Image (tube, rainbow, N blue to C red):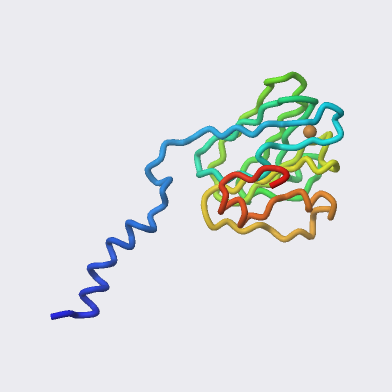
Amino acid sequence: MFSRRAFILSGAPLLAGLILPRYAFAAPQTHTITMESDTLGSKVWFGPVGLLVQPGDTVRWEIRSNVHSVAAYHPANEGHALRIPEGAAPWDSGYLLNPDDNFEVTLTVPGVYDYYCAPHEFAGMVGRIVVGNGAAAKDWSDVPDDVRAAFPEVGEIMAKRAVHVGE
Ligand SMILES: [Cu+2]
């Protein structure tokens, strides 16, 4: 005889399997973000500007052209606002001068990480990484309007996994 209770109980293990995060069984990955410029140096950007990764993954920034850096929004970096998860370690690559110079960070704390290029922050060269799932961005009161406009929305990063400038 059909019983609603029995149905729910038998369905529960199936549902649990469906909502288990995919990354629970995945080996850590390394993701590359390029640091770009047009030939005149009038446009500069991270590619992709928005990226979804899983806890334990490594992000590797590589110079393609021009001179850049990559630093977390964190008070330890030139007094910037804290825009990485509490408990996550800040990073600052310093200036990367040569093509293929690179810098790596392994991200273990879930949440939203905003970062910038020191020489080009106010040209809009900023980026955002979402680590894990369901992370919420902090409010924007601590970032100047013209810089904040360069960040992709968290929801777009979650949906596309990688967001490129101009998309
Ligand atoms: Cu730059």
Residue in view at x 57 percent, y 49 percent: 160
Residue in view at x 23 percent, y 73 percent: 7
Image height of 60 relative to 82, above or below: above
Q: Position of residue 161 (x, y in %)?
A: 56, 47
Q: Is residue 113 left or right of residue 126?
A: left
Q: Position of residue 50 (x, y in %)?
A: 65, 45
Image height of 133 relative to 93, above or below: below
Nearer to me, 48 or 140? 48
The furthest residue to the top: 98
Q: Position of residue 113 (x, y in %)?
A: 65, 47
The furthest residue to the front: 167
Residue in view at x 72 percent, y 45 percent: 166
Q: Is residue 51 left or right of residue 124?
A: left
Image height of 17 relative to 51, above or below: below
Residue in view at x 81 percent, y 49 percent: 147
Nearer to me, 7 or 90? 7
Residue 77 position by quadrant:
top right
Tally of numbered discs: 0
Q: Quadrant of the N terminus?
A: bottom left
Residue 115 position by quadrant:
top right
Ligand 1 is found in which quarter of the picture?
Answer: top right
Q: Position of residue 36 (x, y in %)?
A: 74, 31
The furthest residue to the left: 1
Q: Is residue 105 left or right of residue 65?
A: left
Nearer to me, 144 or 99? 99
